[in-house]
Image (cartoon, rainbow, N blue to C red):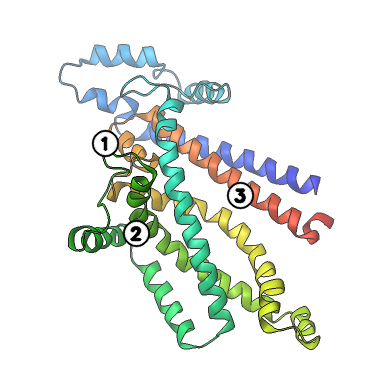
């Protein structure tokens, strides 16, 4: 198991290196470069831009800039925002909790509902419920997240008036209930697509377990279907789902970016779009690396959990 974990850790480091190189090169190849926003200021002359590029070290070769940036990143200096001069880690920290709250709640909703739909669809295979779940999943996967968000705002905010149309809380009321009230609509919208994905995978995993020999043996011993389902089927079907949960994090982050924009949610996704529009490259690169680290760590954690639970991986 030690070699398995070391191998996964080495792969994660290589992946982060590749992401950092590609991200750094692409951002610096964008027309205008890191100083594009400063160039829009009519009072800035070419001499001013050259002087600013020299101060920021942007006049050096690209590979030298990358090595300097990577070394400072490893030592904890992620740079400073072009917008207000604040440290990048501080800027990310101000928006991190909002994104984690949205992602966490939507993931819990997706796993809970998706697992129930998948197991029920597998147990009642080819039933009306199974067909309806399949059609619903295809519809959810075919429609963009922002469309669900706009429809949700129109129906539940404008027409019915049940839920807020945006923001994280009402100004002047920062109670827990107020936060939860604002969280319901964006978390459900973000969870819809992942409910469809999770239910399809869970259905397939449950069907695979149901057809195993040990399930037939359990039936032959006279165990009830409910006990077989709860004790033997669901537990074994959830093993590959742990890996899927880690693999789904990038799509959750992408969905959070769209959802945060639609609902004006003050998270990292909205910060990324704002920073990209302002050409605030230090913050953009910081968000890119922070998201990559988050994805890599989640996948590594999922592999470790599976390795601990599944003896076949430990023994191999």
Residue 60 at x, y = what percent? 43, 18
- Label 1: state its secondary structure: loop
The numbered mark, 3 or 1, whose residue comes first in the sequence reads 1
Of residues 136 and 76, the one drawn nearer to the viewer in this rendering = 136
Q: Give the number of callouts.
A: 3
Q: Which residue is mark 2?
A: 145
Is residue 85 in view from this perspective?
yes
The crowding category of the residue bearing disc 2, from other C-alpha atoms within 10 Å (few below 14, some 14 to 19, many at least 20), is many
Of residues 7 and 5, the one drawn nearer to the viewer in this rendering = 5
Of residues 164 and 142, the one drawn nearer to the viewer in this rendering = 164
- Label 2: state its secondary structure: helix
Name the residue at 66% across, 80% down.
Answer: 226
Q: Residue furthest left?
A: 42
In the image: residue 30, left or right of residue 304: left
Give the mark toward the camera: 2 or 1.
Answer: 1
Residue 189 at x, y = what percent? 36, 59
Q: In 3D space, how far apart are the residues under numbered discs 3 and 1 (Cα atoms)?
A: 39 Å
- Label 3: state its secondary structure: helix
The numbered mark, 2 or 1, whose residue comes first in the sequence reads 2
Q: Which residue is mark 3?
A: 299
Location of residue 35 by image quarter: top left
Q: In 3D space, how far apart are the residues under numbered discs 2 and 3 (Cα atoms)?
A: 24 Å
Q: Which residue is mark 1?
A: 172
In the image: residue 299, left or right of residue 187: right
Q: Do labels 2 and 3 touch, CB within 8 Å?
A: no
The crowding category of the residue bearing disc 1, from other C-alpha atoms within 10 Å (few below 14, some 14 to 19, many at least 20), is few
Residue 266 at x, y = what percent? 34, 40
Q: Do labels 2 and 1 touch, CB within 8 Å?
A: no
Residue 77's place in the image compared with 15, above or below, is above
Residue 251's place in the image compared with 41, above or below, is below
The numbered mark, 2 or 3, whose residue comes first in the sequence reads 2
């Amino acid at each position: 198991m030690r070699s398995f974990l070391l191998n996964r850790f080495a792969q994660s480091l290589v992946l982060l290196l590749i992401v950092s190189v590609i991200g750094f090169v692409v951002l610096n190849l964008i027309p205008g470069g890191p100083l594009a926003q400063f160039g829009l200021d009519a009072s800035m002359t070419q001499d001013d831009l050259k002087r600013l590029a020299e101060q920021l070290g942007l006049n050096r070769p690209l590979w030298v800039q990358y090595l300097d940036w990577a070394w400072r990143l490893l030592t904890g200096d992620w740079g400073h925002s072009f917008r207000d001069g604040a440290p990048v880690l501080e800027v990310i920290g101000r928006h991190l909790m909002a994104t984690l709250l949205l992602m966490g709640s939507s993931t819990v909703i997706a796993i809970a509902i998706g697992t129930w739909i998948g197991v029920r669809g597998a147990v009642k295979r080819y039933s009306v419920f199974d067909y309806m779940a399949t059609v619903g999943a295809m519809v959810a996967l075919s429609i963009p997240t922002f469309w669900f968000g706009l429809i949700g705002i129109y129906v539940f905010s404008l027409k019915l008036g049940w839920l807020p149309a945006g923001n994280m809380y009402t100004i002047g009321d920062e109670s827990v209930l107020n936060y939860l009230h604002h969280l319901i609509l964006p978390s459900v919208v973000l969870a819809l697509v992942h409910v469809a994905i999770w239910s399809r995978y869970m259905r397939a995993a449950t069907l695979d377990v149901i057809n195993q020999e040990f399930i037939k043996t359990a039936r032959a011993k006279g165990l009830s279907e409910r006990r077989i389902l709860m004790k033997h089927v669901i537990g074994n079907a959830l093993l590959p789902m742990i890996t899927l949960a880690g693999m789904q994090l990038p799509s959750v982050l992408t969905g959070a970016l769209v959802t945060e924009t639609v609902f004006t949610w003050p998270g990292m996704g909205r910060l990324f779009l704002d920073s990209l529009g302002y050409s605030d490259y230090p913050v953009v690169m910081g968000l890119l690396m922070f998201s990559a680290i988050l994805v890599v760590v989640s996948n590594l954690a999922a592999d470790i959990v599976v390795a601990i639970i599944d003896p076949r991986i430990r023994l191999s």
